[in-house]
Amino acid sequence: MESHNLIKKRNFVLLLIFWLLYFVHIVLYHFIAASPHIIVFISGGVLLLLVTAMYYFRFHPAIIMYSFFICYYAYIAYITSIEPAVINYLFLFLGIIVSFIYYSYIAIVISTLMSIMIVLYFYVSNTLFTSVTFVKLDIVYFILFTLITMIILLYCAHFSKKLIAITTVKMNKTEDELYSAQEYLQSFFTYNRDAIAVFSLDGKVIKVNDAFEQIYGWKAEEIVGKIIPFIPTDLKGGAESRLERAKKGEKLVAFETQDKRKDGKIIDVEITISPVFNRDQQVVALFGISRDLTEEKESAKFLRQTDKLSLAGEMAAGIAHEIRNPLTSLNGFIQLIHEDSSPYHSYTTIMLSELNRINSIVGEFLLLVKPHDTVMKKHALSTILNDVILLYESECVLKNVVVKTQVEAPHTYICCDANQIKQVLINLLKNALEAMPSGGEIHLNVTQHTKDLTIFIKDTGVGIPSNLLTHIQKPFFTTKPSGTGLGLVVIKNILYQHKGTFEIKSTVGEGTSITLTIPLWKEGTCQ
């Protein structure tokens, strides 16, 4: 197939060359010949049109190749027979030289034999070159020169074919290596989970991968050819300094910084910037790989918080029992002297209240270090909600608070420890009531999804300032005079055991909203 393609390309080149030579020959023949023969022009044109038609109708390339030689020598023989004074016998060598373009041994040999046969024919017929001196010895020289030319061309063709074969093998190997390298790079670029972008030296985006679109939020068609504002304003100085270093050929590996998404959210990232060089080792572009550290940072933060809770739990485990023993004794003796007629009744009342508070704090400590044994069973969510709402019904009336419940899926079942989920809802409703001292509304909505359900609780209370919202989930942080700062920590801990999630939002003067997600019950997942 490759040899056919090579012959086809040579056929096309020779067609162009012979058409050019044909028109040049017509012009020169007109000035050289005393009385030009129109039939000569017509015969040459007919032969060329014949070969051109064969090429157009896609004859086999080898047939067209041999047709070239036959038509060429027929044309030369015809002109020689008409005007022997015009055509020099050296034109017969042109066919042999032309045959070398195909690197074909057969073509060279056939062309050589045709040249010798034409010369011998015209010499024997005594019609060759009547206007020039031509002796028998010239025929011998012509034949020897023709054979030597054939041998040289055969050797050159053999050498050229070997050289072409070696070059073809090397080119194919190089193409395969380049293709493999391109595929590797394309796979790395396309399927990498890290964001990859190529920038021009003036900061414009050349190309980005899918992960870049997911992490930063911009689509490729939105930013290619543009400068994107993903660097926070307060970090531009350091970023520009790093880019200048990269433009000078320095590679910046795995430095941590912050970038800005399309929606304005600031994310923690780890970036590597590499310069892209041309053949002259000049930097022509910058290649950046960005890894989103947001989840990693959140995980590290969660682990640190877990470590704190673990430490608090260990401390609680060490002292809780020691505290409860004297508390039991104190509580017993105070109960003995706690009489209505006692002059110290008001004092003992306060003492009992504070002892109960100390006992409650110790209990929350113990819950952190050693939660109650979780009994996972199938429970109807509506039953849990009704129990919790009933518990706070009277208190809501006293505080002028209305609870509005909307359950889209009343017959939803979840796999949970009912007491722990009740504790979560009780704590949240208690917080909502305390946030509305002058009354208000609590909206409790339940929405079912494919794999889980969402419990949305919103109050119309005073709200939480934004500077405190990021701290209220930390252990021991509280804004209440009598709070322990462990309520939300316990809630998150319970939801974590139930593979649920917790999210809090608040606006000062409008209220606070809590969103919980709990997986739905599935057959065989619990008792």
Image (tube, helix red, strand yellow):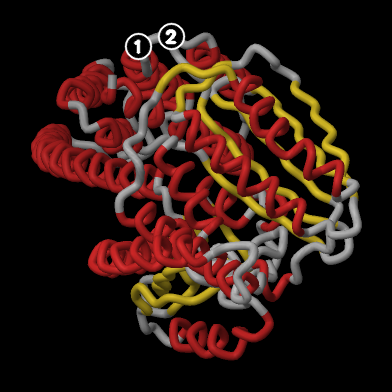
Looking at the rendered image, the quarter that the C terminus falls into is top left
- The answer to whether 378 is drawn above or below residue 339 in the figure is above
Q: From the top left corner, tell me how far across and down residue 86 is, in percent.
A: 46, 36
Q: Which residue is mark 2?
A: 59
- The answer to whether 255 is drawn above or below residue 472 in the figure is below
Residue drawn at 54 percent across, 54 percent down? 212
Residue type marked 1: Ile
Q: Nearer the viewer, residue 57 or 507?
A: 507
Q: Which residue is mark 1?
A: 63
Q: Nearer the viewer, residue 511 or 248?
A: 511
- Asked which quadrant contains residue 450, the reply is top right
Compared across the picture, whether 286 is left or right of 164 comes to right
Residue drawn at 45 percent across, 88 percent down? 245
Residue drawn at 56 percent across, 76 percent down? 201
CB-based contact (under 8 Å), mark 2 and mark 1: yes
Compared across the picture, whether 522 is left or right of 266 comes to left
Residue drawn at 64 percent across, 69 percent down? 230
Find numbered disc 1 in the image and state the secondary structure of the residue it sits on. helix
Compared across the picture, whether 435 is left or right of 438 comes to left
Residue type marked 2: Phe
Find numbered disc 2 in the image and state the secondary structure of the residue it sits on. loop
Distance from disc 2 to disc 1, alpha carbons, whole Å, reads 7 Å
- Asked which quadrant contains residue 191, the reply is top left
- The answer to whether 207 is drawn above or below residue 353 in the figure is above
**10 Å crowding of disc 1: few (<14), some (14-19), many (20+):** few
Q: Nearer the viewer, residue 249 or 263?
A: 263
**10 Å crowding of disc 2: few (<14), some (14-19), many (20+):** few
Q: Is residue 34 visible?
A: yes
Q: From the top left corner, tell me how far across and down residue 174 is, in percent.
A: 23, 46
Q: From the top left corner, tell me how far across and down residue 223 is, in percent.
A: 69, 58
Looking at the rendered image, the quarter that the N terminus falls into is top left
